Amino acid sequence: MVSIYDIDGIEALRRRHAIQPHRMKLFLNALFKNALGRDEALAMLPEEVRDDVAHQVEFQTLELAERHDSEIDGASKLIFQTSDNHLIESVILRPKTGRTSLCISSQVGCACYCSFCATGKMGFTRNLTVTEILDQVVQASRLVKTEGRSIRNVVFMGMGEPLLNLDHLFHSLEIMRAIPYFNYSGSRLMVSTVGIPHAMVRFVEQFPDVQLALSLHSARQDVRERLMPQARKYSLDQLRESLLEASRHGKVMIEYLMLAGVNDGDEDFHALENYLRDIPVHINIIPFNEYAGCNLRGTARPEREAFANRLKAAGFDTTLRYSFGADIAAACGQLVQHKRGLGDGLG
Ligand code: SAH
């Protein structure tokens, strides 16, 4: 079996079956640019090779297990089942601007254990494969195609820490950008990280035009360590070095989740202002999405706005994030699934 995402393997198969390059191009276009199904794509190939290609190529490994549509804001949560029975989630966002986005997962669970994140509570199971990462994009694209939409942006903000699955992340980004495949420009792709300094530097070196978002959440070492255990491994000073390096390639987005009485005070504001001074960043203020079993509380909207306005006044490009899919537990940090059949029920 050769994966559809194995560029060399697919080229070898093309040669073996003497398929003309333009027929292969039509086939890949059908799958990835036109979001057609497997059989419709196979119909682009000469009839005599279709069966062989169908049997020799691995197209998809995820099964769509469930779909939940938000009643308030047009978000849809897709729950996929892997071939070893794990459940992962992707979220389709349909903002009023019309730019449909897809939020995808990079791991089953997560090893970072951020105190505010539901995914962290489920622990880490395994990295997603390249096929599993990209299958989320393929299946979501097919789904929104039926609504006359296409996926405009893909963000790695679902389950998992993408920079701890670096090889598969890189390979997936290559395929998403590859002309015969999805042909996404880097500006349409975003990777969000807890902040793993050496991996951030490797990432921007390899993909200078792909957007990078850093989940900072506090510029105070002690506060950040309490919120994000990873911060004990990589200090804020170390992180700032890699942030400087990354921002040489373009603005980095700083994600700042606002938690009442934790990171929303005066001292927090000044620490943030100092930390980011002279670094070209875009600060995104995020509302906390609550979930069962978490005792943290989000900062109220007026205080979030005031915090954002202070940042703006200090010269920072700052926006407030609206959370999609809160009613279907599809918002940031609400993604949590358990292995099928273990009786935990679905989100
Ligand atoms: N591991 C990556 C990507 C996944 S989380 C990262 O940490 O960046 C995507 C974003 O959602 C991160 O900014 C994360 O901090 C934020 N997030 C996690 N839990 C949240 C919650 N309960 N409410 C709001 N945002 C949350």
Image: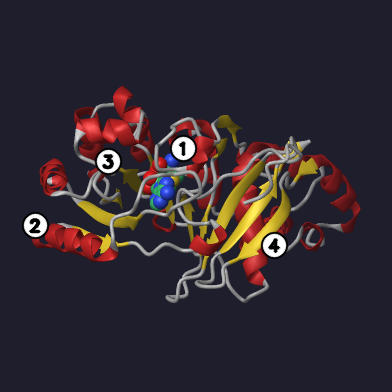
Separation of marks 2 and 1 at Cα, in angstroms:
31 Å
* Residue at image point 14% right, 41% down: 275
* Residue at image point 34% right, 37% down: 205
Q: Which of label 3 and label 4 is nearer to you?
A: 3
Instruction: Report if the CB atoms under discs 2 and 3 are less than 8 Å apart.
Output: no
Closer to the camera in the image, 288 or 214: 288
Classify 10 Å Cα crowding around label 2: few (below 14), some (14-19), many (20 and above): few
Tell me the SS state at disc 1.
loop
Going from the N terminus, do you reach mark 3 or mark 4 first?
4
From the Cβ of disc 3, is ligand 1 less than 8 Å away? no
Going from the N terminus, do you reach mark 2 or mark 1 first?
1
Residue under pointer 4: 30
Residue under pointer 3: 246
Going by the numbered disc 1, the residue's amino acid type is Glu
- Left or right of 81? Residue 116 is left
From the Cβ of disc 1, is ligand 1 less than 8 Å away? yes
Closer to the camera in the image, 336 or 234: 336
**Quadrant in which the N terminus appears:** top right
Going by the numbered disc 4, the residue's amino acid type is Ala
Separation of marks 2 and 3 at Cα, in angstroms:
22 Å
Classify 10 Å Cα crowding around label 4: few (below 14), some (14-19), many (20 and above): many
From the Cβ of disc 2, is ligand 1 less than 8 Å away? no
Residue under pointer 1: 161
In the displayed structure, 229 sits above or below 345; it is above
Separation of marks 3 and 4 at Cα, in angstroms:
35 Å
Residue under pointer 2: 314
Classify 10 Å Cα crowding around label 3: few (below 14), some (14-19), many (20 and above): many
